[in-house]
Image: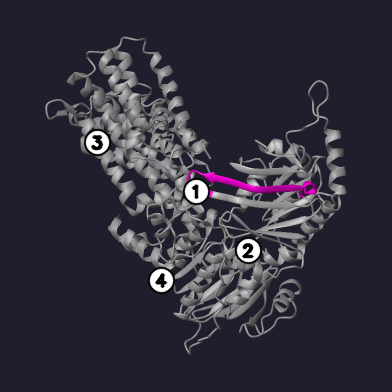
Amino acid sequence: MPQQTNAFKGAAPVARPRVASKMSVAKLWSRYGIFFILAVFVVGLSIASPTFLTPLNLANLGGQISVLGLISLGVLLTVVTGNVDLTVGAMLSLLGAVIAMAGLASGAFAAILAGLVTAAAVGLFNGYLSTRGRNLSVIVTLAMMTAIQGITLLMTDGSPVYGFPDSLNWLGAADVLGGVPVSFVALVVVALVVGWFLSSTVWGRELFAVGGNPEAARLAGIPVARRVKLAFLLSSLLAFLAGLILIGRVASAQPTAGLGMELNAVGAVLIGGASLNGGSGRVANTMAGVAILGLITNGINLLNINGFFAFVVTGAVILIAILLNQWEGGRR
Amino acid sequence: MNDQDLRICATGVRKSYGAVRALRDVQLKIRPGEVHALVGENGAGKSTIIKILSGAIQHDGGDLQIDGQNYSPSNPQEALHAGVGTVYQDPQIVGSMTVCENILLGRFPTSGVGTLEKRVMRDAAKRLLEALEIHLDPDSTCENLSVADKQLLQIARAASFDTLKLLILDEPTASLTPSEVSHLFGLVGRLRKQGVSILFVSHKLDEVESHSDEVTVFRDGQYVAAHRRGEYTIDTLVLEMVGRDLEAAPAKSVCRTDKGPALSVRGLSGRRFRDVSFDVFPGEILGLFGLVGAGRTDLLRAIFGADAIFDGEILLRGKPFRPRHVQDAIAHGLSMVPEDRKGQALVDLLSVNENLNLATFRKHATWGVLNGKSLKDATREFVTKLGIKTASPDAAVSSLSGGNQQKVVIARWLAANPVVLMLDEPAAGIDIGAKSEIYRLMEELAAGGTPIIVVSSELPEILRLSHRVGVMREGRLVGVVDHTEATEERLLSLATLGSAQEEVPA
């Protein structure tokens, strides 16, 4: 093709127009389809159940999804770097127990401190282990998940911990503005902060580069291992917040409270369009994924359907959403 | 020759992708048992016609015949059974399977109950490999095969179809050493003698000249010309490919200042290179020539802190410097454009904007928060300065052509104001127009005082760019030759024979 000095003239003539019609629909879908599914759920439930749109139910729903939402954000951060943090569920149990036991023994301040320190230590250790080799995170965090759950059971002797200072319940149980759960407000604020972090900070963009092409990132001077550790650290700090909410909701720490929640979190991140290969993922889409999973449980309660169906429907929705996400990828 | 007697006769072939016409009215006529080269710049439509012939895509219009029969394969399987085999640039080999299994992939002979006839498979593979004089063990797995062997294996696979009439090779020599290249063309010659036609795409025109019976030139999706062997010169081909004259290389003005060297390397050893010493002066382009695997890339990577240094020292503007990691090297003003653009430089999922500024995010950030406007201003500046063709700074970097992607990578390092710029195969796989622009850019940079080290396996490139040429062989720097004395023969003999240590360091 002839030389052009004007840079933007005749721009990228090969790749762009070809995709105009069909691809852009697929692209739109991969980016916004999840919101469409969410809208279908909201409309469907509004019609099917008169109680769905009541303030009480919505407040309840907001509180319910805040825990899943926070750990999903953590998983998202690690997935962006091409890793995955499977310890978030077990960490909910552990951190809840640590906060509760420290609170029982030496008060709320010590409880928060103990929780933060534990979270940071576990997060950094996860990051350290995951950067020992390529594609290690699934297996090392799987092992860590089991170990952490075991430690929690040993610590608590398998029984719930309660009787800790009431102030620790605030985040999980209190309302503001006439009925909005504090935990939901916390989720919204944290989601906005994480979204801003990923899109507008050096570290945030570097996480995408590390996930998208680790070797290119390294040769561009980005400390790859340190960024991965950062993602795991942030993930466990978010799990700390989620753990605090979880014990506040019921004023007690259940040693198996987070069992299996990492799977819903990974599901929410993936139906939000992120790829386990790293380098992609959006906060808004992840949050839509979280809301959909929350609506499934909520809807099944409202409609008086056997609660076990929630598992089947959740599995089906994750499958369908992920297959639909392949639309764009499968086209080339 | 009558069109009926042709092996492949394609006339008026058209193919559009949406609004883009990738091929408009091209013709391609290949005789039985001839080696036919197809040349053209990137985007000329070479890969499109190959994909059509190999059944990967279907043409929109025009006539396509093989041995006088209409031919329009709807998938690669059909093409293979019709006698058209294709070997792509990246060999499609299952690494964990054996040579024999790869040859027969998809057609494993089985006994009545469905178990594999392993002996039959091995015998068939062995006979085939022997007939083609390919020295591979049918039972070894393919994981550790070199790119060259993988290519040979794929040719063997194509030849294993008894019907093979046309073998298509897409840039077969792009990553081969000279001896591997001659081996490859030896195999091509044997197939040709059996009456197989060979169509190969290449950017290396000297190779085209010496190995093809006929060459067809495409430009902008159109047929330009076809020449029989000996009836053209390389200059005609270039002119027809580009459609204009390329500017001649400017005379080299070595402006060696009295200032000391910008970078000195003394007795440096690392993985795959030993005891290397040289200097680079401000304003100079130092070429590093050698065969693939001579240790040039490893040397560059070690200086850049990407690989370990075992021994020796580096002096940056006279001060000792030992990079602990890449960040360290960058902080000291070193830059490196790696050899593998896609694998080592670009993050496909990110935009042009982000790829271009990847090494310099900090410059556009306060307390770690990026200033989007400042980023885009920087991108626009380099887009204009380097003539990068992109729809917008936010376009996906994967939507750019190879040459423009390479400019993005170079811009990334220009943005860092390097003290020394190192480039590894800067013009690999990009078209002639973009190539000469990148050369000009490097020459301007050097003229502005930035010392440049460039690794290249292309002799014309090395000779065109370098003020001095260091030649490496088997991990050692075997000579540094001034451009006034550098000839293809001299450099090649140093690289292959490695005559006595000469004028080291210059």
Q: Give the number of the disc on residue A129.
A: none
Residue A41 lies, with reference to residue B399, above or below; the image says above
State left or right for residue A55 relative to residue B227.
Answer: left
Quadrant where the N terminus of chain B lies?
Answer: bottom right
Quadrant where the C terminus of chain B lies?
Answer: bottom right
Chain designation of label 2: B
* Circles 2 and 4 on the same subunit: yes
Disc on the earlier residue, 1 or 4: 1
| Secondary structure of the residue carrying numbered label 2 | loop
CA distance separating discs 3 and 2: 51 Å
Location of residue B93 in the rendering, given as x and y in whole percent from the top left corner? 69, 44
Nearer the observer, disc 4 or disc 3?
A: 4
Location of residue B246 in the rendering, given as x and y in whole percent from the top left corner? 56, 72
The residue beneath circle 1 is B20
Disc on the earlier residue, 2 or 4: 2
The part of the chain drawn in magenta is B3-21
Chain designation of label 3: A
Disc 1 residue crowd, few under 14, some 14–19, many 20+, Cα 10 Å: some
* Circles 3 and 1 on the same subunit: no
The residue beneath circle 3 is A188
The residue beneath circle 2 is B271
The residue beneath circle 4 is B417
Chain designation of label 1: B
Quadrant of res B222: bottom right
Nearer the observer, disc 1 or disc 4?
A: 1
Nearer the observer, disc 2 or disc 1?
A: 1
